[in-house]
Image (cartoon, helix red, strand yellow):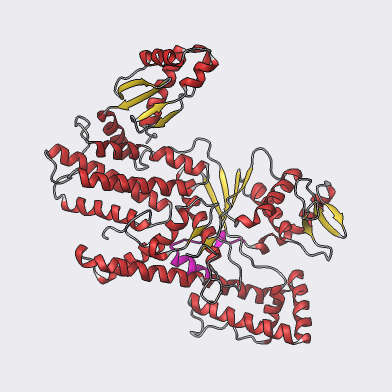
Amino acid sequence: MASVPSLASSVEQRVSDALASALPEAGAADPLLRRSDRADFQANGILALAKKAKANPRELAATVLEGLDKSGVIKEVEVSGPGFLNITVSDEAIIRTLAARAADDRLGVPLNGSAGTTVIDYAQPNVAKEMHVGHLRSAVIGAAMVEILEFTGEKVIRRHHIGDWGTQFGMLIQYLLEHPHELDHKGGDEEASGEEAMSNLNRLYKASRALFDSDEEFKTRARARVVDLQAGDPRTLELWQRFVDESKIYFYSVFNKLDMDIQDPDVVGESGYNDMLVETCKLLEESGVAVRSNGALCVFFDEYKGPDGNPTPLIVQKSDGGFGYAATDLSAIRNRVTDLAATSLIYVVDARQSLHFKMVFETARRAGWLNDGVKAVQLAFGTVLGKDGKPFKTREGETVRLVDLLDEAVERATAVVREKAEKVGLTEAEIVENGQYVGIGAVKYADLSTSAARDYKFDLDQMVSLNGDTSVYLQYAYARIRSIMRNAGDRKPVAHPELELAPAERALGLHLDGFGALIEEAAADYAPHKLAAYLYQLSSLYTTFYADCPVLKADTPEQVENRLFLCDLTARTLSKGMALLGIRTPEKL
């Protein structure tokens, strides 16, 4: 089905046409249409156009008003202030437009006509290391952006650039070679749980580190093993692969808790670009983009200087011949642009790495790997803070394990669900399931309702509250609607454009009409927090509607059907919007 024009776009087009007639020399002028408290919309563009044309703005506004096509959409218009147009649409236009949205599986959200291919790099844990609270934001923000972009028609390729290479593996592999059963599973050939896999890896890491620090001969053997790994020695690679596989068991168990789907082909770690590193360096050096400085291969930038005032270089290859992160990141760009035909690259990475990515992107541009047809963006995110406003730590000052945080969120949420369970008739299985949905939803929403670049406080008490800007509030609004629909019996949702709408119905309807434009904006700006804000406002407007406008006890059968129609479209919009954020909407709560 073709996308459904919103009321805003219909009004904007009509004002634009009237402006073109009143002031032909202005061409296709933007009326600067905005939602307004004084009417449904306000056109603010006349002032600037009048100034440019040396015309009286109120007189120009009156001429525009005279030529405005009001048929079928606009109920009334008034000139306000120095030349604003306050525009009120008809109740009939609201319901007709919403009915067209409701008839579309996509809720009238348009597909992006210029969609391309986006490679999004997110959720990047490290092999043989435990995931902590610092891994949360990349995973949650990245997964939401994947869903939002795919919904607008973009081809999205997921990449999980896991840390699976480096000198630390010499120590780990050598220890495993000398203690071959350290990663064996208790259940024999059966796959371990995520907890057992991480326990194995933690135990082996601590034991190998202790030996590395205390035994010079082991340290020598471990360093020689790094050379074997980098040279591609088959036995060494086989043991390295065991670490990767064991870590994946653990990673996937954590992502499963987060209700995120991570597929094996999407996991392409640092090792995936090893074969390209030498060529990347050669191409940079031969083109003059990178130069040798004290034996290291560096790229210099006039605009990035260190505390001493000297330029801060991007080190692509160290003086000992080893490769830095830059070599891997630049090789990944070459692969993603050339082999995957990406038109956009998004890196969901901590804001503290911003300088690194600025230098990497600029280097890739100088080398010609990024051009006008490809954009690269770091979707930088801030830090997760504790209630005290400091980086989130345990009482002992340790980094918080991600699984502990998620388990506690589910535990708290399950307690909240259990309090209401008897009233809504939940079984024990539904309490447990809803506790998962509410707990994980609470964690994701707290993250996604904050602009990615900002830090945010992790406060579970607030996150699982039924009041305020929380996912539980949104989930509860959805469940309330589903309860009304179940109680409606034979009465069905039917749009009745002929009915006069109450103020709360109008406000809800106009907000529902903005869903398509909002999704386009969230996708274009890589801003899932804008979708979260829209859904919170939708739930708030629905709460007012629910209080002011009886649904099943409305005055006439037609009014019951029309209000059921508004309920149903609100529920579908909430469900779709929450799904794009990676959050489930329980039918009962």
Determine whether, in the image, residue 266 is placed left or right of residue 583: right
Q: Position of residue 174 (x, y in %)?
A: 70, 81
Residue at (65% x, 49% y) in the render: 339
Q: Is residue 319 above or below residue 290?
A: below
**In front of the other: 326 or 308:** 308
Residue 422 in view (yes/no): yes
Q: Position of residue 386 (x, y in %)?
A: 50, 65
**In front of the other: 90 or 483:** 90
Q: Position of residue 391 (x, y in %)?
A: 55, 65
Determine whether, in the image, residue 139 is placed left or right of residue 317: left
The span shown in magenta is 251-268
Q: Quadrant of residue 561?
A: top left
Q: Position of residue 222 (x, y in %)?
A: 74, 80
Determine whether, in the image, residue 440 is placed left or right of residue 506: right
- Quadrant (top left, top right, bottom left, bottom right) of the C terminus: bottom left
- Quadrant (top left, top right, bottom left, bottom right) of the N terminus: top left
